[in-house]
Image (tube, rainbow, N blue to C red):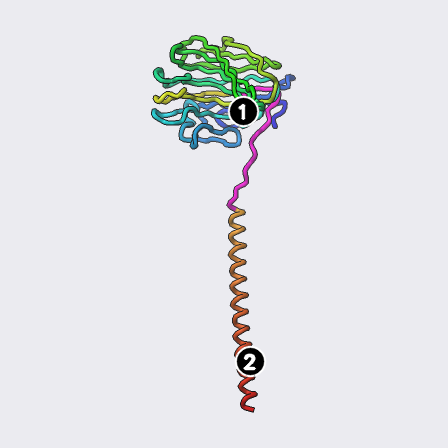
Amino acid sequence: MFRAAAIVSVGLLPVLVATGARPEVALRFRFSEGAGGDFDPRQLKLVGGRMPVWYCKLERHGMRLVIPPRDQVRWCAVQPRVRVEGDFQITGTYRILWLPEASAAHGAGAKIQIKDQRGWKANVGRLFVPGRGHVYSAHYAWLEGDRYVHSRELSETEAVAGKLRLVRRGKMLGYYAAEEGSDEFRKLREVEFGSEDLAQVQFAALTGGASEGVDVVWTEIEVRAGRLEESYRVQKPLWPLVVIVAVLGAVTVYLVVRLRRGSGVRSSDQRTRSRGRAGGQERR
């Protein structure tokens, strides 16, 4: 659990720093030079497809999400292992290296997606949408029964790099975007999202169903909230248990074999002695 402090990651090495009087915590990753090829599964996980490690690569200039042409996977993402409570501000710095513009039926590009404990979703993205061109997307999906109802607003843009942001204050959720080199965020939309905890935060690349693939780099991601709860539990390795069970099994088999052999020898000796006594009695 993270309380009254910020966890700042340069590369993937977390450092605790004070935040002042405001009860706010932050989890930040700067995917830049110095990060090397390390990936700490206690803080982040890769999602998308059966083998997401094939699509997510930590490189010198950032976390690169690449879905190659003709691949069946439609999206992949980096997901911090936290549950977000209360008000929050979630920001990602992205760069689009390749974006399909022909067959991306639902929009292709980069997005930040959240899902709360009810299953309600929201995302802000920089996409190419057929019929609308290059846009910022502000999407919201809520459940009615077991079906999602979707609402999306699009705003034109030509930016290929910049920042995307989701901000919740109370029950209201705001969608924001800024172009590369600027911290002036443009408000795209605001909806009543609710105040339930977030079960999931993802920084993703998606093809929108296009066969040409997509190539996106996230250079920095940050989750800032009133409280962040770690959702990772260390999995103890199973091999010591396997070794112990194997050794115990081998010892058990050895003892059983020894006992059976010993029993067989004793039975043979008893039969021999019995035959000997019987022969002596006959001679007498």
Q: Position of residue 167 (x, y in %)?
A: 55, 14
The residue at the point 36 percent across, 25 percent down is: 68
Q: Amino acid at mark 2?
A: Ser
Q: Residue furthest front?
A: 145
Indicate whether residue 263 is drawn in magenta. Answer: no
Q: Which residues are the magenta region?
A: 222-239
Can residue 4 be seen by looking at this rendering? Answer: yes
Q: Quadrant location of residue 256?
A: bottom right
Whether residue 268 is situated above or below residue 233 in the rendered picture:
below
Q: Quadrant of residue 25?
A: top right
* Number of numbered discs overlaid on the protein picture: 2
In percent of width and height, residue 4 lies at 63, 22
Q: Which residue is mark 1?
A: 200
State the mark number for residue 274: 2
Q: Secondary structure at mark 1?
A: strand
Query: Looking at the image, is 234 positioned above or below residue 178?
Result: below
Judged left or right of residue 88, residue 52 is: left
